[in-house]
Image: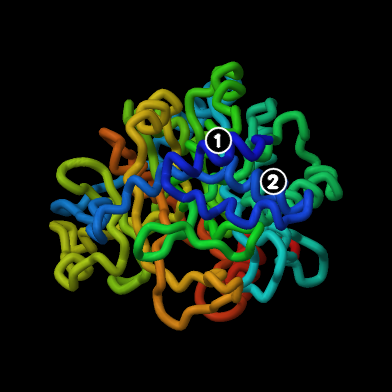
Amino acid sequence: MINREKAMSIITKYRQEHLLQYYDELSDEEKNELLKQIELIDFSVLENLNGGKNIADIRGTFAPLGAVTIGDIASNSKEYIRTGVEAIKAGKAAAVLLAGGQGTRLGFDKPKGMFNIGVDKELYIFECLIINLMDVVELAGTWIPLYIMTSEKNNKDTMDFFAEKNYFGYDSDYIHFFIQDMAPSVDFDGRILMESKSRISVSPNGNGGWFSSLVRAGLLEDIKKKGVEWINVFAVDNVLQRIADPGFLGAVIKSGFQSGSKVVSKAAPEEKVGVLCLEDGKPSIVEYYEMTDEMRTLIDENGELAYKYGVILNYLFNVNKLEEICDKKLPVHVVDKKIPFMNENGDYIIPTSPNGHKFETLVLDMVHLQDSCLAYEVVREKEFAPVKNATGVDSVETARELLKANGVEI
């Protein structure tokens, strides 16, 4: 861990010396906590403050993008799976699980993956994902490296939980945990906010920050040493998703594309899901709230929605291309938020209106920096059971029903 002098040199570079103004008043434990935060924070995001103009949010011209459809996949599945299994056996595939979130919206104050989705038996979200990955391990006859991104808040709980559950039968030598980089929160003048005298106000740097966080944790060296060429990155909250799917991997390899995205056909034009498309001729994702009414309802020559394919946050990226992107740096989105903070009198304030900025990188920008992305359509009912809410749409209830419909005992 860095010492006080090193911490001061870091924050002085960004004119944030006030972060250490109470240092001499702190206990040894509080001093260590503050120094550790300064060591982990990505201060470079402050360079994106430019008078409120958020360049990262300026979008180009959108156009529809076709997909390898369910029918196409069925016709070529043997070849796709054979190619994918060969790559996995050769050690060319790894998986990254994005698991930094808490189960707050589920009424659960622990890592979301620790939530018990079972009814008559214990069945945790993490367990569902490991079971799904084990299907591929058994098919290929080899373990697949799994890198699990946690957050500063849930890292210990997550690691302890996996150890307690004996990694759900997965070989622990092939599981590596790393903490997502944190970005500071600032007021509208660019001054970093404090939560207390020993704690800086921070938040995770967005779902696009997974690769830079992995690199910063020193795991890229491990990935390259293993000969991994493809990384399947996926979110924690879809209990039915197929991970390191040989068919998906094989289809992307055979296509010659730089990346791939699993997609589902939209249930309705107004469904709140990001859509894989083209933006200025390159693959991209348009969020549902960015789509015009014309885009939502546009019909193609086959009588189907032109902007049809919704993303499910299950992507395949080439390691060499990821390194190239990482060197360029992803666009940083500056978002206005209501940020609790400690004022100059030492009082903890919970604002009622936006009082500052948070910084996020988004995986959609990672897709847009690819020259090509294969849209790979999957059957919604078989691979898309998101657990975002306690009840209603995309909830614990709907995920349980989908698990049962797919023969999973819960």
> Height in image: 355 above or below 379?
below
Disc number placed over residue 381 in the picture, else none: none
Q: Nearer the viewer, residue 359 or 248?
A: 359
Residue type indicated by callout 2? Ile
Q: Position of residue 21 (x, y in %)?
A: 58, 55
What element does badge 1 sit on? helix
Q: In the figure, residue 333 lies in which quadrant?
A: bottom left
Q: Residue at x 52, y 34 (%)?
A: 246
Residue type indicated by callout 1? Leu
The C terminus - image quarter = bottom right
Q: Nearer the viewer, residue 106 or 407?
A: 106
Q: Residues within 10 Å of mark 2 (few under 14, many from 20)?
A: some
Taking the image as drawn, is residue 153 in sight?
A: yes
Which mark is first along the chain, 1 or 2?
2
Q: Position of residue 99 (x, y in %)?
A: 61, 52
The residue pinned by badge 1 equals 214
The residue pinned by badge 2 equals 130
The CA span between labels 2 and 1 is: 20 Å
